[in-house]
Image (cartoon, helix red, strand yellow):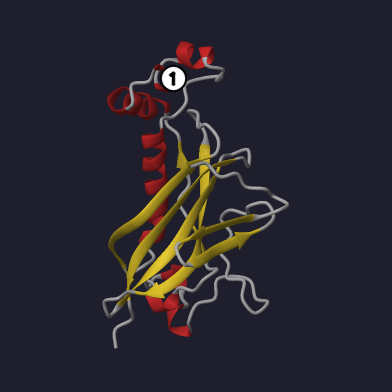
Amino acid sequence: MRRLMSNRAGFREKTGEVCAGFVTGRLRLFEISRLRGGRSGLSLPKNKRGRGMSRKLYFDDVKKGDRFAGATVTVERVEMLDFGRRFDDQPMHFDAEAARAMGFPDVVACGAYTFALSSKATTHIWQQWHFLPSGLGVELNFLAPLFAGDVLRTEMEILETRPSSKPGRGWLETILRCENQNGVAAFTTRAHFLLLGRPG
C-alpha cells in the first residue's frame, strides 16, 4: 500500500499497538541525530564514544528517535536491466521504447531491484549494531520511479524499541527513508530488527 508524505503536515504511521512515529519538515539525509531533551547530534553512552563508532551498539544503546545514515547507492544501468530481464520481465524494466510508451522517460527499475538497493543501503547500518538474524513486518512503499544513474541517499529512524520475549535481546521498529539526487522521496522501508542486549 502506497503512502504519501507531506513536508508540511508530516508523516505518521501506526503498526499494531504502538504509535510508530512522527516526522515533519523536509527529510535531511546523512544527519544522524537524537532529538531528546533539546539536544541534537548522536548521543552515545560514554563507553560508546570514540573514533568512528568503532564499537557496535547493543539494543540498550539505541533509543526511540535515533537516526542512522545508510549507505549511498547508485542505480547501475547494466545491473538494473539484467535484474529486470531475469526477475521481472515486464518490458518497462528493460526496454526503453516500451517504458516511453508508458509515459516514462526511460527504463524504470523493478520493485525487486529497488528492494535489493534498500537492503544494500541498510547493511551499512546493521554493521554498527550487534544485529541478530531478523526482519519482521517488512513493508516497502514505492514513492517515485527509479532510473539508471540515480544516486540514492538513505536514513533510518528508530520508531520504537521493545524488549524481546526472550532475554538478552530486543526489537527495533524502524523506517528507512530514501531520496534521490534531486531530493525526491523515492521509497520507504519499514521493518522490525532484533538486536543483542548488553551482556550482564
Which residue corresponds to the image point at 49% horizontal and 74% vertical from the top-left? 63
Q: Position of residue 172 (x, y in %)?
A: 41, 67
Image point (33%, 21%), residue name: 89
Left/right of residue 63 with respect to residue 119 in the rendered view:
right
Please identify the quadrant where the C terminus is shown: bottom left
Number of marks in the rendered image: 1
Q: Secondary structure at mark 1?
A: helix
Query: Among all residues in the image, which is located at the extreme front?
Result: 17
User: Where 155 sits versus 143, above or below?
Assistant: below
Q: For residue 105, which quarter of the picture?
A: top right
Question: On the picture, is 35 further left or further right than 76?
Answer: right
**Residue 137, horizontal then vertical, whole percent:** 37, 55
Which residue in the rendered view is the most extreme toward the bottom? Answer: 200
Q: Find residue 166 and report its horizontal and vertical position in percent.
A: 26, 76
Whole-percent x, y for residue 164 in the image: 32, 74
> Residue at coordinates 42% horizontally, 46% vertically from top-left?
118
176 above or below 38?
A: above
Residue 41 sits above or below residue 102 on the image: below
Residue 37's place in the image compared with 40, above or below, is below
Q: Which residue is mark 1?
A: 92
Q: Residue at x 43, y 77 (%)?
A: 61
10 Å neighbourhood of mark 1: few (<14), some, or many (≥20)? many
Amino acid type indicated by mark 1: Met
Q: Of residues 66 and 3, which is closer to you in this image?
A: 3
Place residue 161 in its image quadrant. bottom left
| Between 178 and 31, the one nearer to me in the picture | 178
